[in-house]
C-alpha cells in the first residue's frame, strides 16, 4: 500500500501576491459608480480575503442588491486592469519550488474567481507550480473557503491527514479546521496578530524563506 501524497492547498491574495493596489482601486471604482462614499483603508484591507460580495454589503449598509451591483462594477475594472496591479512577494517562487522539489503537490485554493486566479498566475509565471487552480465561480459557488476546500479534497482525492492549507486570513484557518486539515498562516499578508490569536493556526510563518520548512514539518 503506497503512502498518501503530500499536498498543500495555497491561497493567492496576501499569500503569494500583494493585491492591495488593484483590489482597493477596483472597490473604490465600484462605490463611485454607485455614487456611494469611498471606503477607508481599514475597510479596504479587510476586504482582502473574504468573498467580496459580503464586504460590499458591509460597506453598503447591508443592502444585498447594492452589493451585487457593486460586485459587477468591481469586476468591470478588476478583470481588465486591477488583477495586474499586483506584485509577487519576494521569495515566493523559490519557496514554491522548494515545496515542489520536496514532493509536495500543490493546488491553488482561492475565494477569488478561478478565471482571475488563472490569469494572475500566468502573468506572474506561477502556474507551473500548481497541479490545478481552484477558485470560486462567478455564480458564487465555492466562494466560501470551507466549501472550496471540501470541494478540492473531494475532486482531487486528497487525504486530509497529509494536507496543509497555506493562507493569511481567518477564513483560511476556519476552512482548514472545518475540513480537518492543518493550516499554516503567513505573517506577510493581511491577517493580524489579533486574528491569529482568535483563530489560531497550527503554525505562523513569519518569513517567506521559512514557508517550505514549516509546511514540510507540518506534513510530517
Image (cartoon, rainbow, N blue to C red):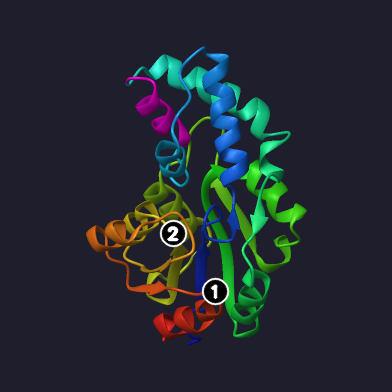
Element under label 2?
A: loop
Residue 215 located left or right of residue 96 = left
Q: Position of residue 83 (x, y in %)?
A: 67, 42
Which label's residue is closer to the chain start, 1 or 2? 2
Mark 1 Cα shell of 10 Å, populated few (<14), some (14-19), many (≥20) = some
Identify residue for label 2.
168
Q: Is residue 119 above or below residue 61?
A: below
- Secondary structure mostly seen in magenta is helix
Q: Is residue 21 above or below residue 219?
A: above
Q: Nearer the viewer, residue 215 or 154?
A: 215
Q: Nearer the viewer, residue 97 or 130?
A: 97
Q: Nearer the viewer, residue 178 or 174?
A: 174
* Number of numbered tags placed on the structure image: 2
Identify the residue shown where x is 72% and y is 35%. 81
**Are the residues flagged by discs 1 and 2 in contact, CB closer than 8 Å?**
no
Identify the residue shown where x is 48% and y is 85%. 3
Q: Is residue 58 magenta?
A: yes
Residue 61 located left or right of residue 188 = left
| Residue 208 - label | 1
Element under label 1?
A: helix
Q: Is residue 38 above or below residue 143?
A: above
Q: Is residue 127 magenta?
A: no
Identify the residue shown where x is 67% and y is 71%. 93
Magenta stretch: give its range. 52-61
Identify the residue shown where x is 64% and y is 73%. 91
Mark 2 Cα shell of 10 Å, populated few (<14), some (14-19), many (≥20) = many
Q: Position of residue 57 (x, y in %)?
A: 38, 25
Q: Position of residue 118 (x, y in %)?
A: 68, 49
| Residue 128 - label | none
Q: Quadrant of the C terminus?
A: bottom left
Q: Position of residue 72 (x, y in %)?
A: 57, 22
Amino acid at each position: 500500500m503506497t503512502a498518501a501524497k503530500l499536498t498543500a492547498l495555497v491561497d493567492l491574495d496576501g499569500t503569494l501576491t500583494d493585491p492591495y493596489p488593484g483590489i482597493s482601486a477596483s472597490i473604490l471604482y465600484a462605490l463611485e459608480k454607485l455614487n456611494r462614499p469611498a471606503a477607508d483603508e481599514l475597510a479596504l484591507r479587510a476586504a482582502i480575503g473574504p468573498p467580496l460580495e459580503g464586504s460590499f454589503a458591509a460597506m453598503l449598509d447591508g443592502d444585498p442588491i447594492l452589493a451585487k451591483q457593486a460586485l459587477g462594477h468591481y469586476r468591470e475594472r478588476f478583470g481588465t486592469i486591477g488583477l495586474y496591479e499586483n506584485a509577487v512577494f519576494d521569495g515566493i517562487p523559490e519557496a514554491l519550488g522548494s515545496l515542489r522539489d520536496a514532493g509536495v503537490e500543490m493546488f491553488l485554493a482561492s475565494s477569488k474567481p478561478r478565471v482571475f486566479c488563472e490569469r494572475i498566475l500566468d502573468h506572474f509565471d506561477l502556474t507551473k507550480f500548481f497541479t490545478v487552480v481552484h477558485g470560486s465561480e462567478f455564480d458564487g459557488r465555492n466562494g466560501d473557503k470551507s466549501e472550496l476546500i471540501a470541494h478540492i479534497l473531494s475532486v482531487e482525492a486528497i487525504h486530509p491527514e497529509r494536507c496543509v492549507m497555506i493562507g493569511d486570513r481567518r477564513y483560511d484557518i476556519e476552512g482548514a479546521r472545518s475540513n480537518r486539515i492543518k493550516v499554516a498562516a503567513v505573517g506577510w499578508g493581511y491577517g493580524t496578530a489579533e486574528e491569529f490569536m482568535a483563530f489560531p493556526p497550527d503554525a505562523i510563518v513569519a518569513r517567506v524563506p521559512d514557508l517550505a520548512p514549516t509546511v514540510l514539518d507540518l506534513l510530517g
